Amino acid sequence: MNERISPPAAAIQGSHCTPEQYEALYRQSVEQPDAFWAEQAKRLDWFKAPTEIANWSFDPVDIRWYEDGVLNLCHNCVDRHLPERGDQVALLWEGDEPGVTRSLTYRQLHAEVVRMANVLKTQGVKKGDRVTLYLPMILEAAVAMLACARIGAVHSVVFGGFSPEALRGRIEDCRSRIVVTADGGMRGGKVVPLKANVDAALDGGPEVDAVLVIRHCRNDVAMMEGRDRWYDEVAADASDDCPCEPMNAEDPLFILYTSGSTGKPKGVLHTTGGYAVWTALTFHYVFDYRPGEMFWCTADVGWVTGHSYVVYGPLANGATSLMFEGVPNYPDCSRFWDMVERHKVNIFYTAPTAIRALAREGEAPVKKHDRSSIRILGTVGEPINPQAWLWYWRVVGDERCPIVDTWWQTETGGIMITTLPGAHDMKPGSAGKPFFGIVPELLDAEGKARGGAAEGNLCMATSWPGQMRTVYGDHERFVQTYFSAYRGHYFSGDGCRRDDDGYYWITGRVDDVINVSGHRMGTAEVESALVSHKLVAESAVVGYPHDIKGQGIYCYVTLIAGEEPSDALETELRQHVRKEIGPIATPDLIHFTPALPKTRSGKIMRRILRKIAENEYGSLGDTSTLADPGLVDSLIEGRRNR
Ligand code: WTA
């Protein structure tokens, strides 16, 4: 499908970027990057303006932006707005129950951030220290991130849906001595026992100095003497003065763990100056944000989308950002549109999986709410199929609202490929064009760039300010993961096609990462969770097409000798993976098999397993190198039976 839809004139009147402006700015951004990025840095307040702009190399790998600049991102997101918009709402929050709201003006946000920053200081947190945040989607999550940024501490936000095991690994990896959590979080009417999870994560595990607990659900929790403190009690004595720490542009801002094709999740490290410029700039152009508008990104702050487009991007622009604790189908599946109506949301940014799930419920839940406030719609996290795109366009947006399909990654810090509302026609299913400063390339297996209309592995020829700088504690892994497939190029892990008009169509991951409901998952992580069960001998996990989730988790499992598969064991293995990683990693299908297909040298043939899981038996390719070619037939047989 190659349908072209022009943005409706009314929605983009006065937009920040016309087609001509895009062409001119894009050209400047790639032809004179230093001049372009020096100019863009002026979007921020610097304690010392940078004179060094771009200083990077992909071979050897060393990436620096604005390296002699000094700034503080919290100052840019909060303090600098006080004179002009101190009484404007910075963050509006709605809880799990409809209509339960709280808000913070920029002035109130300032007071809360200062308080939290001082509390962290009293707990001994200093510049450069890592602070783990394991919180629900409440205002305090944003406050805690900003408080860390204010004092130069490095936050590591762990999504509240991760299990104690997963949390423990992340606390250990960055050796954080302090955890900020809440008694619990609410999702769909149920309490998520966050504090109890922290207790389990720390039990016999990493030693920390303090656990600060925010009172939210008022569920029962155990408090460990000497380690655990109620945040409100410590905060009561906190001073209301805390200057912003001057940070070098290349000082670390945060670590965020993300899944890769091998091994444990990686601690993606972002630094201060480049990330700040990148998120501020992309937010301004991609969402065409106008002062006074209500911006709603439905992502959790536990993911990069929440970092960049719930907190830093919007606040750096002085926007009003809506935070939502609940889920799209509670109390019913009109929740999003009910909130759009009540809060007069102007820009709405969500994931394709949510769109597909809501589309399944039909038009009525959408149509019964007034959505006339919406001007721009956005999607992120996974490829959006044209059918879901068109539903979003027709039903949610009434064919009035441009849709931005934004491709980017935890590693990229912010949006990389997208249309801009006022500058481009849209093509359902295509992310669109490179953002300013982005030079995508499609490389073939030999590393040759394919020009014009072509397909290949999506790489970047040049750096951009929001690029991750390293894997925390393991720079070699950073180099290996992103710069070794194609020396001198950043490799995204995605496959992609470019059409005759220069539009990019992401075709999905080409590595062993799968994308389940917009959440990135390493198949190796699920495999290691499965084999940690005492009855499992071996496992291979692949993705397969799933109507709602985009991809589902398909697990091939072999049991230790003498054990027989059963429904009970299947349920137990599902539970086991949930416990090890978290509910988002729950296997969709478990396929017991006496053996896995291997080459004679013992390598699992994942390509074949993927095809079988996808129900594509006609294209299995060469199976002659298999140690036991007959196994394939029995695997197909097993697949057909589910
Ligand atoms: C996928 C989320 C197609 C892609 C911001 C990428 C997308 C991975 C899109 C990163 C999109 C993200 N179209 N695919 N618009 N956006 N992806 O790190 O495979 O959680 O590599 O960052 O999601 O996921 P991550």
Image (tube, grey):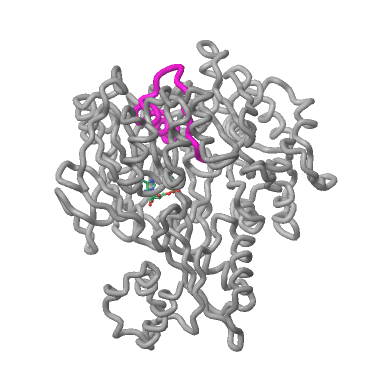
Where is residue 399? Give x, y as percent. 31, 31
Q: Work out whether 166 lies above or below 36.
A: below
Where is residue 388? Give x, y as percent. 36, 45
Q: Answer with left or right where residue 541 lies relative to residue 392.
A: right
Q: Is residue 68 visible?
A: no
| 370 in the magenta segment | no
Residue 291 location, quadrant? top left
- Magenta region, residue range: 274-299
Where is residue 497? Give x, y as percent. 23, 52
Residue closest to the eye, 188 or 557? 188
Q: Answer with left or right where residue 257 lies relative to residue 619.
A: right
Where is residue 102? Give x, y as percent. 64, 25
Q: Residue at x 53, y 61 (%)?
A: 264
Residue closest to the eye, 403 or 119? 403
Q: Work out whether 138 lies above or below 255.
A: above
Q: Work out whether 180 lies above or below 634.
A: above
